[in-house]
Image: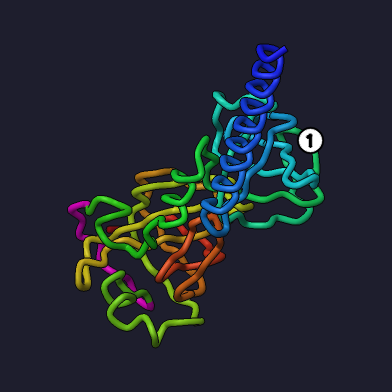
Amino acid sequence: MKIKHHFLALLIGLAFTAFACNMGTTRVTEETLPPGTHKVVVDDILHTSTYTYLNVEEKGTAFWIAIPKREDLQKGKTYYYSGGYEMPNFQSKELDRTFETLYLVQEVTETPEKTGDIMQTPRESGKRTPMQEEALNIKPGAGEISIADLYSQKASYAGKTVKIRGKIVKYNAGIMGKNWAHIQDGSKFENYYDLTVTTMDNLNPGEVVVFEGVISLDKDFGAGYTYEVIMEDAKATPSTSL
């Protein structure tokens, strides 16, 4: 009888210890989740040539997010992300589908620690960090300004429409419903030499064009996309000269 009592007591002790350990693990996980971090479980995955669409569930609520195309994600697995840019009535032509609400997310990770790193993404500003400087000598035409002019007098250009001639050194199409270009002209102000431009025009890297658009300062699109200076909704005209 004593052996049975001791055995029963041992089982109860082990069960209590396991329960206590699990409670402790859950509590630590919840308390150490970085602020603004979402913990989601993937229910469905759809791929296009550019994006991966994830139907996820967070605390009983299901919704769709989209990230740059990634094929290693798995249904039923837990992932983490921070930020997110809400895109209401987002239409995917490739999927022939309109999402009532879609969140554009920079990335999902398997651990919240990495998500915390994403939250600290440096602001793009035209400095060397986002883009490498190219050796160019593209002069502004009549009625145009240089990238150096823009950065040296950015406050005076805020909210105004300007023209800038430059070479497209990087181009991404169809992000947040727009096309994104980085341009340079060879001019520089305090190591600022690169300008980000959003446009609906279809362009190619390496082209030299004249962009005409509105200048915005400290623009935050969410999902880690923050720009100290950006030209928005620009129209592009092929350059006839350098």
Residue name at image x 54 percent, y 55 percent: 223
Q: Position of residue 1 (x, y in %)?
A: 73, 12
> In the visual, does 214 lie left or right of 86?
left
Is residue 95 on the magenta stretch?
no
Quarter of the image for the C terminus: give it. bottom left
Q: Which residue is mark 1?
A: 96
- Which type of secondary structure does the marked residue at label 1 adopt? loop
67 lies above or below 116: above
Q: Residue 138: say if magenta.
A: yes
* 23 displayed left or right of 102: left
Circle 1 packing at 10 Å, graded few (<14), some (14-19), many (20+), is few
Residue 53, image quadrant: top right
Amino acid identity at mark 1: Asp
Q: Residue at x 43, y 66 (%)?
A: 227
Above or below residue 236? Residue 12 is above
In this picture, is 86 found above or below 42? below
What is the span of residues highlighted in magenta in the rendered image?
134-143
Characterize the magenta stretch by its predominant secondary structure. Answer: loop
